[in-house]
Image (cartoon, rainbow, N blue to C red):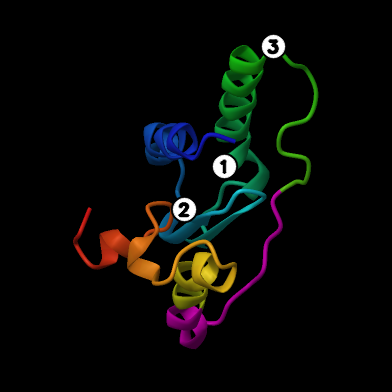
Amino acid sequence: MDRADYLGFYSAVQHRWDWTTLSYALMSSHVHFGLVAGEEPLEKVFRSVHSRVARRFHLGHGTLGTVLADRPKLYGVPEVGLARMVAYHHRNPVSAGVVGRASESRWTSHRAYLRLD
């Protein structure tokens, strides 16, 4: 998965949904999003992004088949747990050994929180 494409597609269609993005982490094998729920079904929210990502991937690699295998999973987080959820997303690349510090990752929302990007 090309993470830059994923973020570009997400940004391009995000205004269509009534969900609010709090945080994200794009890992090599999965993605995390912290969202404040709206009325749209979660599957509809990500279907347009995942369809575009898959199309771009197949065009670039000359392949067919599943690119993003699982459907989005929804885990409710109480309001008092939102800061912990955001921290979990931002530390995910550190925990995976991808980077030494959260601020080094270009694929989480952490640098935006720090106003570095």
Is the Cβ of the residue at disc 1 closer than 8 Å to that at disc 3?
Answer: no
Q: Distance between the residues labelled 1 and 2?
A: 8 Å
Mark 1 or 2 closer to N-term?
A: 2
Closer to the camera in the image, 76 or 68: 68
Q: Distance between the residues labelled 1 and 3?
A: 27 Å
Q: Can residue 115 be seen in this view?
A: yes
Q: In this view, does 114 lie to the left or right of 16?
A: left
The region drawn magenta spans 72-84
Does the stretch in magenta take in 78? yes
Q: What residue type is labelled 2?
A: Trp
Residue receiving disc 2: 19
Q: Residues within 10 Å of mark 2 (few under 14, many from 20)?
A: some
Circle 1: element type: helix
Mark 2 or 3 closer to N-term?
A: 2
Vertical comparison of 55 with 73: above or below: above
Mark 1 or 3 closer to N-term?
A: 1
Q: Position of residue 35 (x, y in %)?
A: 49, 61
Q: How far apart are marks 2 and 3 (CA)?
A: 34 Å
Residue receiving disc 3: 62
Q: Which residue is drawn at 67% across and 43% down?
A: 43
Residue receiving disc 1: 45
Closer mark to the observer between disc 1 and disc 3: 3
Q: How crowded is mark 3: few (under 14 residues within 10 Å), some or many (20 or more)?
A: few
